[in-house]
Image: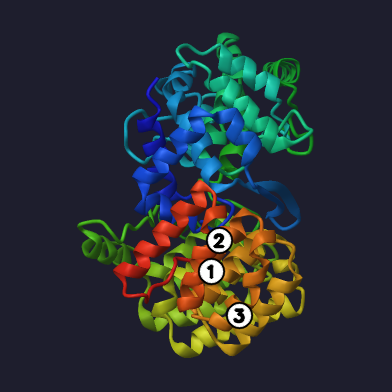
Amino acid sequence: MSIDKHFKRALKNISKYGDTDVFPFPLENSIFFDNQKDVVTLLKSVHKDFESALDIEPPFNESYLSPVGYTGFRWVTQIDPLWNAYLLGIAVSIGEEIENSRIPTNDQYIYSYRFVSGEDEKLFDASIGWHAFHKRSIELAESHDFVAICDISDFYQRIRHHKLENALTRLNNVGDIPNRIIKFLGNFSGTYSHGLPVGGPAARILAELLLSKTDRLLKEKGISFCRFVDDYHLFASSEEEIFDGLLFLSEKLINNEGLALQKAKTRIVSSTEFIKTSPLSLNDDDDERHDSDEKTNAKVFLSLTLRFDPYSPTAEEDYEALKSEVEKFDIIGLLRKEVAKSKIDIVVTRQIIKSLRFISDDLRDQAVLSACDSLHNLYPIFPTIMIMLKKIWNDLSENTRSKISEIIRNLFKENSRLVKTKPNQVYACRVLFCDSSPENIELLTNLYITTESVMIKRDIILAMFNWSNDAWLSDIRSQFRGFPPPLRRAFIIGSYALGDEGSHWRNHNKRGFSDFEKLVQKWASDKSQQNNGVWQVPL
């Protein structure tokens, strides 16, 4: 099995879509894009001596709690970038076999992460997902009387490695890839024999394989159902029949996969209630939402596809078309209505925040400040807000940018719950990196000293490079030998802000660089030469 093309596809996917949807993109993603050929060579070297590489240079992963909703949390991990690319590459290499083992898409049962073969950076069919799942659920509810709504408890964290290994080894034409995946996961989970890293496409491919057996058993039993990731909807014409279906699903998940349904979220409802409360119906307890005109307006707003590729040949036309569509809605009014609630509609509010990129300049600053003044109400979508602030930073007025920086600094100073989790801290820091004010530099300098997060320290080193803070970088130079891999790579890049001092330092230390670190240095050197020494890393 030739692995080259799969590594190339994995790198293209990571370069465009990131390594995970729960952390900001690491700097290494840009290196993967710019130096794909060199990275493929490095990945092939890892593949050739996999066990030795896993022992000598094991993945440096960081795991933290990430908020879910207002009071929930989940355990998330950012895998070492190179090892993440390796895991995705070997998962992609068996992606077609995994997809072939699943219930076919056209049977309309499974709506999550349908793998697409080929060389394109898109790994999954974009037309099949959350929206299609709920649309199909409404269709099935209309022809049945009862619906069971349930999801698997702590799905990714509870996937047992030996159960996954059994599913992998049943596949055809996969060579020793199952063994490599299981050994990697054993390294990832340490002393535990369960768990997949949340948020990345490799884990999604593998998780779908694990549930394929249960899906097929449900279908063969004649149970009407559809699934999206760990969410199941079952449909029946009587309460006895729907209960039997729920019992069958629970039994198969426990006996075959060691998984269980969440007791608190499992419920049986009438089809009428299910349709009325569907996310696509947009009904809730607020009186205003029962107004038919407003509900229709919200439906249309949610149907907007706010994806914009600035590198597309038709980028300018695409932007104007999106702007024209967004301008049909009162974005400020929609935002005010959400922040006035005790709990926001997460789906609607996330769409509102994403739309800020496409509203007129005279309204954008007003909307942004309104959102920033209501961050505590908007807690469940804090990362979405930070991501959007970064995207539109240069389009905001200087006064608005200054106010945003102050608001975010105060979150850290007050130890606000908004930045008590490390993922939220990282997203907030990425916005502060847009402003090299003395106040931001002081806060980040102190944060570097106090934080235990390597991820945050890494980003601060890179921000100091972007700001040409040679005094600060020179001061931490002596700590290099004790740095973990992410900080070593960051400082190698940061050394290019030190002029001759940095050059002498690299010449003295390069013999101790790993192969990946040598590639990072080569990338930084090329960037420096191409830009006459004046350049910045994307943060």
Contact check, label 2 and label 1, Cβ < 8 Å: yes
Mark 2 secondary-structure assignment: helix
Residue type at mark 1 is Trp
Name of the residue lying farthest toward the top: 220
Mark 1 secondary-structure assignment: helix
Q: CA–CA distance between discs 2 and 1?
A: 6 Å
Give coordinates of residue 368: x percent, y percent: 51, 77
Which quadrant would residue 523 be assigned to in this image?
bottom left
Q: For residue 509, which numbered disc appears in the image?
A: 2
Give the quadrant of the N terminus.
top left
Q: Nearer the viewer, residue 55 or 298?
A: 55
Q: Is residue 179 left or right of residue 124?
A: right
Query: Label 2: how many residues lie within 10 Å, few (<14), some (14-19) or many (20+)?
Result: few
Q: CA–CA distance between discs 3 and 1?
A: 15 Å
Residue type at mark 3 is Trp
The relative height of residue 232 versus residue 368 in the rendered view (above or below) is above
Q: Is residue 111 visible?
A: no
Q: For residue 472, which numbered disc appears in the image?
A: 3
Residue at the (42%, 71%) spot, across then down: 536
Give coordinates of residue 76: x percent, y percent: 67, 47
Q: Nearer the viewer, residue 345 or 27?
A: 27
Q: CA–CA distance between discs 2 and 3?
A: 19 Å
Give coordinates of residue 232: x percent, y percent: 62, 29
Q: For residue 505, which numbered disc appears in the image?
A: 1
First reached walking from the N terminus: tag 2 or tag 3: 3
